[in-house]
Image (cartoon, rainbow, N blue to C red):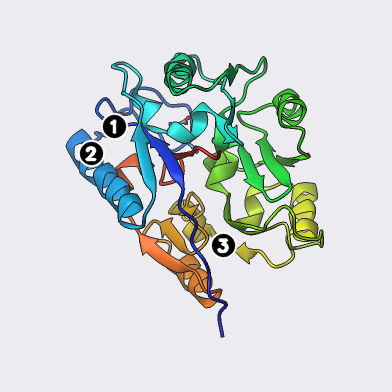
């Protein structure tokens, strides 16, 4: 009998894909010669925003900037915990101007923004999971940025090494379904409920995940390649791509309610649902 999961209303920051396209290739999904249908991307993105709002979540938008086609991937711009904003410094020169555009939005919304000195791509690689911040490295965010994040938030940062270029950000290989209340007594496997694709990680990092999250939902390569792990959960509803069918079944068996949202056009840039969504945690 699956447990009954309780949703918690969230505040999300997104950016309309007005200027979304694939003009450069900074991950193996991107092929500038394959045409992108920006009109279709816009329709798919609006469906995502509608799904969030229909489930009771607040969605705010940052204005898109011409010439920054990846700005739609709001997750990469920052990690926000307790209203404190740890900004970004992109690996690719093409994406570097996005950091200031998002920092301007956060400042106007009344937040100070810490600008990291080392390459750090926000929630793409920094994923809060209960008491820990899980932190990806290997392709984008550096171990130095992990140390900066630990110092800034005063929370233990657990570094995880990504090894498969198709899963270049941590949020393409792992998602948090439900962070456990930080005031709950500590016990292994009680930090958070997560799902991940083990082969995206180095052997040592895989062992760390198995130790910390023995009850995790494991995803297949097929579902991972549909960017099934690039999902957003409110604790009950999991917004995920319709092609991640095995993952949807596994989540349903654990009491989650899969909500399919198709962002196929964004896959051409290596992005999915979570990439398009920054969570503002206050
Ligand atoms: N084209 C973008 C890049 O390679 C996609 C970013 C996806 N974002 C994410 N949070 N995984 O940087």
> Which is more toward the observer, 115 or 19?
115
Marks 2 and 1, how far apart in space? 6 Å
**Residue bearing the label numbered 1:** 17
**Residue bearing the label numbered 3:** 219
Q: Picture quarter containing residue 139?
A: top right
Whether residue 64 is visible, yes or no, is yes
Residue that appears at 43% across and 41% down: 12
Marks 2 and 3, how far apart in space? 28 Å
Q: Are marks 2 and 1 in contact (CB under 8 Å)?
A: yes
Q: Is mark 3 within 8 Å of ligand 1?
A: no
Whether residue 270 is visible, yes or no, is no
Left or right placement of residue 82 versus residue 271 in this view = right
On the image, the x and y values in percent for residue 105 come to 42, 21
Residue that appears at 47% across and 52% down: 231
Left or right placement of residue 50 versus residue 141 in this view = left
Q: Secondary structure at mark 1?
A: loop
Residue that appears at 41% across and 56% down: 239
Residue 90 numbered tag? none
Q: Secondary structure at mark 3?
A: loop
Callout count: 3
Q: Secondary structure at mark 2?
A: helix
Mark 3 Cα shell of 10 Å, populated few (<14), some (14-19), many (≥20): many
Where 154 falls versus 108 (above or below)? below
- Numbered disc in front, either 3 or 1: 1
On the image, the x and y values in percent for residue 272 come to 41, 45
Upstream in the sequence, badge 2 or badge 3?
Answer: 2
Q: Is mark 1 within 8 Å of ligand 1?
A: no
Upstream in the sequence, badge 3 or badge 1?
Answer: 1
**Residue bearing the label numbered 2:** 42
């Amino acid at each position: 009998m699956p447990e009954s999961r309780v949703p918690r209303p969230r505040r999300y920051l997104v950016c309309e894909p007005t200027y979304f396209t694939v003009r450069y290739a900074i991950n193996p999904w991107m092929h500038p010669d394959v045409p992108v249908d920006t009109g279709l991307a816009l329709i798919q993105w609006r469906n995502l925003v509608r799904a969030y709002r229909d489930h009771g979540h607040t969605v705010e938008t940052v204005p898109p900037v011409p010439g920054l086609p990846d700005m739609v991937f709001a997750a990469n711009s920052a990690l926000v915990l307790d209203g404190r904003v740890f900004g970004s410094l992109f690996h690719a020169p093409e994406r570097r101007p996005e950091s200031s555009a998002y920092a301007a939005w956060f400042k106007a919304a009344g937040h100070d923004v810490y600008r990291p000195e080392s390459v750090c791509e926000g929630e793409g690689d920094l994923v809060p999971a209960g008491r820990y911040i899980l932190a990806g490295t290997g392709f984008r965010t550096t171990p130095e940025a992990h140390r900066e994040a630990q110092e800034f938030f005063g929370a233990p940062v657990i570094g995880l090494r990504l090894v498969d270029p198709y899963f270049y950000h941590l949020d393409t290989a792992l998602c948090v379904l439900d962070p456990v209340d930080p005031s709950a007594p500590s016990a292994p496997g009680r930090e958070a409920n997560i799902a991940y694709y083990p082969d995206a990680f180095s052997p040592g990092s895989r062992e760390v995940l198995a130790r910390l999250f023995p009850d995790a939902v494991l995803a297949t390569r097929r579902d991972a390649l549909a960017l099934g792990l690039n999902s957003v959960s409110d604790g009950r509803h999991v917004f995920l791509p319709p092609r991640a069918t095995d993952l949807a079944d596994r989540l349903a068996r654990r009491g989650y309610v899969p909500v399919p949202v198709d962002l196929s056009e964004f896959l051409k840039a290596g992005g999915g649902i979570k990439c398009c969504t920054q969570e503002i945690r206050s």
